[in-house]
Amino acid sequence: MTDKQEKARLVILISGRGSNMRSIIAAAEQGELNIDIAAVLSNRPDAAGLQFAHEAGISTAVIDHKLFESRESFDKAMAAEIDRYQPDFVILAGFMRILTAEFVDHFAGRLINIHPSLLPKFKGLHTHQRAIEAGETEHGASVHFVTAELDDGPVILQAKVPVLTNDNADTLAARVLEQEHMLYPAAIKKLVTQQAD
């Protein structure tokens, strides 16, 4: 961006209720983020977050993965839809699809995800239970650039929570999610500020 006042354009991808998307929209509405959310896209027509985005005045679209014969054909269609909005960043906010290398390469340096662990620890699923079983004293979330390898891209920002002696996966997940809702907008603010400089 040449003009420091120009807003960074975001496209957000969701698969469900989009709680992290909601925190980003709230931060933008409160003037904390110099962004324009160009669109919210989902691979699921029934994603609850679509209605929320629509009510917030944001364009929405569905690219239903069930209508495609292959992961590659779905990713091509999704990439084409994203490209219509010419975003500075593509934000994965509970987008529950493993992306092809071609898709990741197409948006290299612009594709951002949030993962519920302190990467590089606990890549993949069931992070909270795994952290407890490993005897970790702290856990958290990471916002990172997406690369072709799962949960492996450079970390932008992290938030930590203590693992308490009476924690189970659900109580730990709830505490981490609270941090995610502050972490994702903060990470986006960092990216947008760096881009403007």
Image (spheres, rainbow, N blue to C red):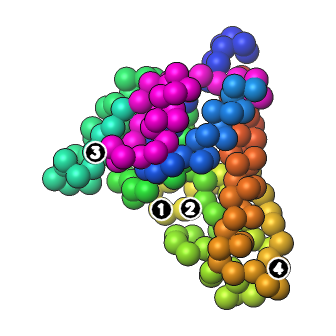
Q: CA distance from mark 2 to mark 3?
A: 26 Å
Residue 8 as seen in the image, left or right of residue 132: left
Three-letter residue code for mark 4: Leu
Percent from the top left, x then y, of residue 114?
A: 61, 53
User: Which of label 2 and label 3 is nearer to you?
Assistant: 3
Q: Quadrant of the N terminus?
A: top right
Mark closest to the chain's N terminus, 2 or 4: 2
Q: Is residue 42 inside the magenta stretch?
A: yes
Q: Is residue 45 visible?
A: yes
SS of the residue under disc 4? loop
Give 95 or 25, whichever is nearer the viewer.
25
Q: Quadrant of the C terminus?
A: top right
Q: Where residue 152 is drawn, which disc sits there?
A: 2
Residue 145 as seen in the image, left or right of residue 147: right
Relative to 116, is 27 above or below?
A: above
Question: To which residue does mark 1 refer?
Answer: 149
Q: In terms of image quadrants, where is residue 82?
A: top left
SS of the residue under disc 1? loop
Which residues fall within the magenta stretch?
31-60
Question: To which residue does mark 3 refer?
Answer: 64
Relative to 104, is 174 above or below?
A: below
Three-letter residue code for mark 1: Glu
C-beta proximity under 8 Å, tags 2 and 1 = yes
Relative to 196, is 141 above or below?
A: below
